[in-house]
Image (spheres, rainbow, N blue to C red):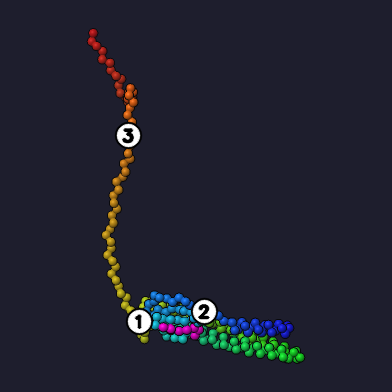
Amino acid sequence: MSTRHAFVILGLSAAALAGCSSGFTTVEPRVLAPHELTLRYENEFQVHSPQGLVATGVRYRGLAEYVACVPDAERHALAAESAGDAAVGLTIAGLTLGVGGMAGLAGLAYQNDPDLMWGLLLGGLGVEAIGLIMTAIGRATKIDAHGNAVDAVNYYNDAVGSLGGRCGPRGAEIPQTQYIDPPAAPAPIYPVPVQPEVPMLPPALPEPEGTTPPQPADLPPERIILDNP
């Protein structure tokens, strides 16, 4: 491996460790129950209620207390907090090792001593590799934290939030459902009888003059009256 190749690898590793992205949501829900939770993203995930901000990622502090009356929601919220703490620790450690690994570039100053130069360069590469691995694990743990937070919000909304209730000191507090009498059933609609259509026969054509109307075959022959002598 040449000195130039080692320099390129160290630079790419540092760029990968320092890479990040940002973004934000632009649409906010307008129809919510009084204590229903929603998710937003403004360079970090945020859990909001109609009263204000509840928790932010990646640690999601305060979410478990807000959803404590729903066991499944509380379990996922605690898992989100734990995963968030681990993700922050791994990411900070990985970035620290990645930046520290760049000290291996100091080996370029000892080109007259190849053993020392390659020792520093390879040591820096090893430290940066460990930093990359820790940062990747931290990113995966961060995704777990977001997933658990979303599950906690969904469990809470299904059980309490979407019904207009909230988690109080004694558990779930859900307002009593207001029942409205259904409208009266409409009067039955009876079918209108339809008269069957009678086919119209075409008018009979007049018989032409000088023709004898046809006689039935079963009539007796015409009788001839003879004069008495």
The boundaries of the magenta stretch are 52-59
Name the residue carrying label 2: 23
- Left/right placement of residue 42 relative to residue 169 reads right
Which residue is the extreme one toward the top? 229
**Numbered disc 1: secondary structure:** strand
**N-terminal of the two: label 3 or label 2?**
2
Q: Amino acid at mark 1?
A: Glu
Name the residue carrying label 3: 203
Q: Amino acid at mark 3?
A: Pro
Q: Nearer the viewer, residue 203 or 179?
A: 203
Name the residue carrying label 1: 173
Number of residues whose C-alpha sits closer than 10 Å to that of mark 1, classed few (under 14), some (14–19) or many (20 or more): some
Q: Amino acid at mark 2?
A: Gly
- Label 1 vs label 2, nearer the camera: 2
Number of residues whose C-alpha sits closer than 10 Å to that of mark 3, classed few (under 14), some (14–19) or many (20 or more): few
Dividing the image into 4 quarters, which one contains the N terminus?
Answer: bottom right
Tag 1 and tag 2, C-beta contact below 8 Å: no
